[in-house]
Image: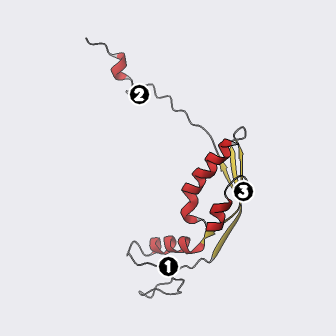
Amino acid sequence: MWQSKIYAFLIRRILGPYLTPESKARISNQSIYLSLREGTLSLSNIELDGEVITKKINSSLSSGSGDDQSECNTENNDGKNTICIKRIVVKTFNISLAFAYNSNENDDSNADCDNDDT
């Protein structure tokens, strides 16, 4: 099913930096369930890279001080505690899909076509 391959590609692009290499490789037809009728996309048995998540959380906590908090230390150089995540396993990750249509009657995107001033 070509739709599953497209969604697997998009999921790998979006979640890829946060996934372990093994999980990236598994996101294919075996770990992805797609139902356009139901509007659901489910991923099963994915693992997030704890080191990447740790860096993101600790850089947010340090308010952009620029310190690379990749090591799992209990205290950083400022004496503040840091968070250390070793492993995150997600058994099932569900995404609801829906198309949204915004019919804005005041849309000026076709204004040049409607006016005939010549």
Residue furthest top in the image: 118
Res. 23 image quadrant: bottom right
Q: Amino acid at mark 3?
A: Ser
Instruction: Give the structural element (helix, strand or loop) at label 1.
Output: loop
Crowd band around label 3 with a 10 angstrom C-alpha radius: few (<14), some (14–19), many (20+): some
Q: Are marks 3 and 2 in contact (CB under 8 Å)?
A: no
Mark 1 or mark 2: which comes first in sequence? 1
**Mark 1: amino acid:** Ser
Q: Is residue 87 above or below residue 6?
A: below
Q: Nearer the viewer, residue 15 or 97?
A: 15
Residue 112 figure quarter: top left
Mark whose residue sits in front, 1 or 2: 1
Amino acid of disc 2: Asp
Q: Classify 115 as above or below 37.
A: above
The furthest residue to the left: 118
Left or right of residue 7, residue 115 in this image: left
Element under disc 2: loop
Q: Which residue is mark 3?
A: 31
Q: Nearer the viewer, mark 3 or mark 2?
A: 3
